[in-house]
């Protein structure tokens, strides 16, 4: 029986739009402010930077399949660097830039950490039933820990892995496999709960027993092979799906 549940963070535990749209706008605006103007080529704007990573600034929407939703900050820096003039600082290596981005992320997420519906009660129900809980996110580990602390649920997780924790970023499976090692279970005794193609591919690569997709509707699932019964709109449907509660299991674990 699968007794380890590994969660993505944004779009699963946190509301992606409410929590991260202000962050995306602030980081893009800061980056755009550093672009030197040479007067000969069109200036890259904040909206251009956002659009390149799947954020529509005009309507305030984050594409769940875009780089911002599925990738890491390292991937965002690589995408932006290719758009910037040659005399621009190297985003990956300029420590002052990276430190300021960390400050921006910290300040904005502390102000806008919003859960995706009721996450506390479902997670506590799984924890009290004996499931071990873990998290693998393409955000930084410190940011993930702070978000869970803000929601009052950090202590429920046996391990939290970020893109900077030394295990790569999803869809690389090493973060999931590390969670299995910490929990003392094999990958085939674990379940991944995510919302993006990166989550799904990491679960498949790791050999997880099941992937459960959080999506507003079945047609929004990131991969066609995901079964309808494995799609939930938020975590309130997870305990019943895993057989926790009076109704019994609805999925083959």
Image (tube, helix red, strand yellow):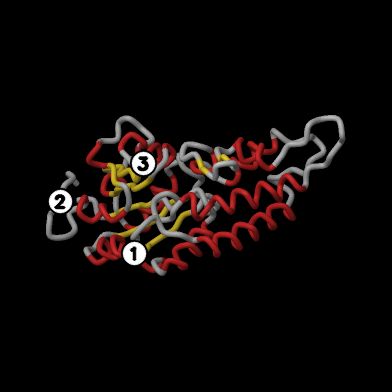
Q: Residue at x 46, y 67 (%)?
A: 149
Near mark 1 (Cα within 10 A), the count class, few <14, some 14-19 or many ≥20, is some
The front one of 181 and 145 is 145
Q: Residue at x 44, y 53 (%)?
A: 15
Compute the Cα span from label 3 to label 2: 21 Å
Residue lying farthest to the right in this orientation: 39
User: Mark 3 highlights which residue?
Assistant: 203
Near mark 3 (Cα within 10 A), the count class, few <14, some 14-19 or many ≥20, is many
Q: Residue at x 55, y 42 (%)?
A: 59
User: Mark 1 highlights which residue?
Assistant: 120
Q: Quadrant of residue 223?
A: top left
Q: Earlier in the sequence, mark 2 or mark 1?
A: 1
Q: Secondary structure at mark 3?
A: helix
Q: Is disc 1 in contact with disc 3, using a CB cutoff of under 8 Å? A: no
Q: Secondary structure at mark 1?
A: helix
Q: Position of residue 38 (x, y in %)?
A: 86, 36
Q: Nearer the viewer, mark 2 or mark 1?
A: 1
User: Mark 2 highlights which residue?
Assistant: 249
Q: Position of residue 86 (x, y in %)?
A: 79, 35
Q: Residue at x 37, y 52 (%)?
A: 7
């Amino acid at each position: 029986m699968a007794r380890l549940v590994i969660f993505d963070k944004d779009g699963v535990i946190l509301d992606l739009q409410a929590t991260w749209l202000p962050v995306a706008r602030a980081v893009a605006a800061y980056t755009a402010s550093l672009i030197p103007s040479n007067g000969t080529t069109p200036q890259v704007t904040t909206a251009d930077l956002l659009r390149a990573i799947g954020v529509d600034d005009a309507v305030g929407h984050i594409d769940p399949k875009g780089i911002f939703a599925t990738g890491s900050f390292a991937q965002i820096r690589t995408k932006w660097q290719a758009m910037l003039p040659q005399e621009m600082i190297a985003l990956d290596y300029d420590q002052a830039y990276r430190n300021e981005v960390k400050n921006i992320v910290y300040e904005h997420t502390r102000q806008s950490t919003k859960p995706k519906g009721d996450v506390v009660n479902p997670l506590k129900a799984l924890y009290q039933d004996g499931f071990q809980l873990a998290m693998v996110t393409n955000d930084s580990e410190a940011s993930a820990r702070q978000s869970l602390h803000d929601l009052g649920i950090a202590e429920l997780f046996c391990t939290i892995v970020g893109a900077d924790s030394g295990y790569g970023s999803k869809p690389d499976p090493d973060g999931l496999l590390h969670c299995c090692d910490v929990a003392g279970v094999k990958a085939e005794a674990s379940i991944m709960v995510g919302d993006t193609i990166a989550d799904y591919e990491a679960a498949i690569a790791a050999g997880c027993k099941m992937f459960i997709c959080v999506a507003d509707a079945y047609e929004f699932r990131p991969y066609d092979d995901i079964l309808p019964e494995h799609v939930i709109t938020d975590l309130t449907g997870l305990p019943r799906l895993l057989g926790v509660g009076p109704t019994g299991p609805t999925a083959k674990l």
